[in-house]
Image: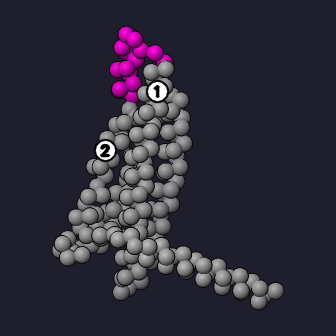
Amino acid sequence: MELMVAAAVLVCLTLAGAFMYRRLSSGTVLPVTAEWIDELSVDRYRPMMRLLEGDDLRFLSSQPDYTSAMAANFRRERCRVFRGYLTCLHSDFQRVSMALKIVMVQSRYDRPDLAAVLLQSQRAFAIGMVLVHCRLVLYRYGLATVDVADLLKVFDGARLELRSLVPAQMGAAA
């Protein structure tokens, strides 16, 4: 019985290792340079914060030929665009996370502090994404508002952590 458990654990570890190796060597090149990290600024997502504010919908409702169907269509389209921003934000966060993992793996020293920060950031980002998606569904039907400020703070914190590890002179060399 113990031999079967040991064999199962060994198989699982082998598969997990193969998966990680394949994922890290999948040909995805992360140009971990100061410029690349700076391009991932939260400023790219500033329009996202304004996208679901009520000002535009209030203006629409003040128009003489306004209908509730127009408001529903407006919210549906804004949700579609907002989801596009969320997809890009998720992708950028994944890139930053992968770059942090690469920095940890290539470091001469163990970095349990960086690993803890990364795990905390990943957990907070995942929870934030779930909450934003739930609120987005409610927004679609006019039942809630959506605030992405906390999600952007988590992204920016991970980005700044990575930026602090990449020297500015690596810009063109890497």
Residue 141: in magenta span: no
Q: Residue furthest top?
A: 64
Image height check: is 15 above or below 152? below
| Disc 2, SS | helix
Three-letter residue code for mark 1: Asn
Seen at 37% across and 36% down, the residue is 51
Question: Which percent across, then down, holds residue 133?
Answer: 51, 44
Three-letter residue code for mark 2: Arg
Image height check: is 2 above or below 112? below
Seen at 41% across and 83% down, the residue is 110
Q: In front: 69, or 129? A: 69
Q: Which span of residues is magenta-colored?
A: 54-68
Question: Which percent across, then down, holds residue 33?
Answer: 25, 70
Sequence-first disc among 1 and 2:
2
Crowding near pointer 1: few (<14 within 10 Å), some, many (20+)? few
Q: CA distance from mark 1 to mark 2?
A: 23 Å
Quadrant of the image occupied by residue 155: bottom left
Quadrant of the image occupied by residue 162: bottom left
Point out which mark residue 73 bears: 1
Q: Residue furthest right?
A: 1
Seen at 36% across and 86% down, the residue is 108
Q: Please identify, in this view, whether the residue under mark 1 or under mark 2 is nearer the observer.
A: 1
Seen at 33% across and 62% down, the residue is 159
On-image quarter of the C terminus: bottom left
| Disc 1, SS | helix
Q: Residue tagged by mark 2?
A: 46
Residue 55: in magenta span: yes
Image height check: is 76 above or below 92? above
Residue 45 visible in image: yes
